[in-house]
Structures are given as structure tokens and as C-alpha cells.
Amino acid sequence: MSASIRLGIVGGAGWLGGAIAAAALEAGVVRAQDLALSYRSARPDRFPGALWTKDNQALADRSDVILLSVRPQDWPALAVDARGKLVISVMAGIRLAEIGAKHGTRRVARTLPNAAAEVARSYTPWIASGEATGEDRAVVRAILCACGLQDEVGSERDIDYLTGLTGSGPAFPALLADAMMRHAIAFGLEPAVAQRAVNTVLTGTGRLLELKDASPADTVEAFLGYRGTTAAAIETMRAAGFGEAVAKGLAAAFEKSIAMGEA
Ligand SMILES: NC(=O)c1ccc[n+]([C@@H]2O[C@H](COP(=O)([O-])OP(=O)(O)OC[C@H]3O[C@@H](n4cnc5c(N)ncnc54)[C@H](OP(=O)(O)O)[C@@H]3O)[C@@H](O)[C@H]2O)c1
């Protein structure tokens, strides 16, 4: 990959677009003077040296790589001619072929980061069109590595599945944390103490999983081995349908992802 790319982020004022811009700048994948970001409502006061514009075509014209980070429902109204350029989408549900046809390029990558991009800890699956070059793939990898870990996957169906599993993924430990918090409050714990306790369990577990890189089944098995409070809780949660609830939720996310692409 060449030293710094000229990157244009459509929807750069949004959550994910801004997080990717920050991560790419921090990692040195793009220099501020080579970065353009578009906004629709309010111009954010961040990324000094970068160009902020409301004109998406002007953004595309000065960039070699155009990253689409608007919500899927705003994409049909987006008119950008990206002929001769690499277009990278982070939009859930929208297919490679549709993106290429709308923006006039066959060099397209479909990626699905998650909210942890904001702290450079996203897991991002991606796939590129057959016409994307080796250099294009290197650019996609560099941007996504700046945001965390990435994998090039074999099919768009994998992306549709991972849209739920990892795109929505940060919401699931958050859901578990919320359930733990509610229980702790109902027990009578001080809310501030409960919140600190629950959040620290999550961040500590995340760090442990990251360092050990063990399979989740092995981790659970290790906890079960103590036959104490943890085993009592895990076995009761399993008997109450924990596994089935997660499986049903992930299946619903997959169906929704497919439906979003067809809408
Ligand atoms: N957030 C996540 O965790 C996550 C994870 C995976 C994938 N994604 C995908 O990432 C995309 C962005 O999500 P987000 O959470 O960052 O949403 P967001 O915070 O709403 O950001 C989208 C931004 O796009 C702007 N926008 C819409 N149309 C525009 C246009 N024509 N020109 C310039 N800017 C325009 C919006 O402006 P306004 O302020 O005027 O609305 C908004 O600032 C979505 O397609 C989503 O599927 C998000």
C-alpha cells in the first residue's frame, strides 16, 4: 500500500465514520490533509487539517478511496459518481453489486465494523468484488486494522450473518450487563457500586479473553470446573434457556440483515 491514501468519508460526521477517521489518522493510514469528510446537518469541530464538506461529489473527486458511512435508509438518496475509485461500504445489508452499480465502479468492498471501532477494538469482516485489485485489498485491510481486527470472508452471506454476530455484537454483552445490573439493584446494591462492579466484570473479561485467546467453551469449562458459585449460576442460566435465547437472537439478527438488503 502507498504511504498515505486520499480518503473521503461520506457521513464522516456520524458515529462510525468519525471513529474510522480517528483510527485511520492515529494509525497513520491517512494524513489529515488527505482526508475529506462530509456532513449533512452540523459540521463537527474535529480532525484539524482535514476537509469538511457538504458536497459529496467534491469529496469523491479529491479522493482515491471513498468510504460510505451513511445509514442504509439514507443511501438511495446519495448521488456520488465514483468512477475509477475504490468504494468501501460499512453499511449493513447493502450488496457489493448494488453499491458498484449505483456509484459507477466495480472496485467495491463491503465491510461490517462494530461500535468498538471507537476504541480501535472492532472486529470487522469484509469482502471485496472480483475487480478489486491487490492494492485495493491492502487499503481495505490497512483501514480496518487501524480499527481493530479484520477478516476477509468468503461470501456476502457470511457478512450478513456477521452483521448480527459481530456488527451488533457489542450490544449482547451490554444486554448481559444490564440484566446483571438490574438483578444487583433488585438485591439492594448501591447503583453506583453495582455499575462499577458490572462494568469492571465486562472490561476485565474482555481483557482476559484478548490475552488468553482461548475458545469460549474452554473458558466456560474452566469456570465450571470449580463447582462453586460460578457453576451454580451457569448451570441455572443454561437450564433457563440461555443458549436458546442467544441462538434465537442471532437467527433474528441474520434474518433482519437479509431483509435490510432486500428492502
Ligand atoms: N454504529 C455501529 O456500531 C455500526 C456497526 C456496523 C455498521 N454500521 C453502519 O455504519 C453506517 C453509519 O452508522 P452510524 O452509527 O455512524 O450512523 P450515524 O451516526 O447516524 O451516522 C451517519 C451519518 O451520515 C450522515 N449523512 C446521511 N446522509 C448524508 C449525506 N447525503 N451526506 C453526508 N452525510 C450524510 C448523517 O447526517 P445527519 O446527522 O444529518 O443524520 C450522519 O451524521 C450505517 O450504514 C450502519 O449500518 C454501524
Image (spheres, rainbow, N blue to C red):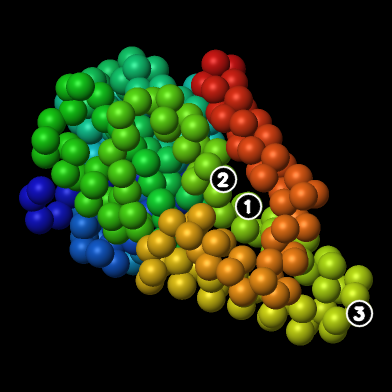
Task: Specify the amino acid type for callout 2.
Answer: Ser
Seen in the picture, residue 239 relative to 136 is either above or below; the reply is below
Viewer-nearest of labels 1 and 2? 1
Circle 3 packing at 10 Å, graded few (<14), some (14-19), many (20+), is: few
Q: What residue did someone put label 1 on?
A: 172
Q: What residue did someone put label 3 on?
A: 188
Task: Specify the amino acid type for callout 1.
Answer: Phe
Task: Specify the amino acid type for callout 3.
Answer: Gly
Which quadrant of the figure has residue 73? top right
Percent of width and height locating residue 79:
41, 24
Q: Mark yes or no: residue 38 visible.
A: no
Q: What residue did someone put label 2 on?
A: 168
* In-front residue for pair 245/182: 245
Of callouts 2 and 3, the N-terminal one: 2
Label 1 – label 3 distance at C-alpha: 25 Å
Q: Mark yes or no: residue 236 visible.
A: yes
Q: Any atom of ligand 1 within 8 Å of the CB at mark 2?
A: yes
- Is disc 3 placed on a helix, strand or loop? loop
Q: Any atom of ligand 1 within 8 Å of the CB at mark 3?
A: no
Disc number placed over residue 76 in the picture, else none? none
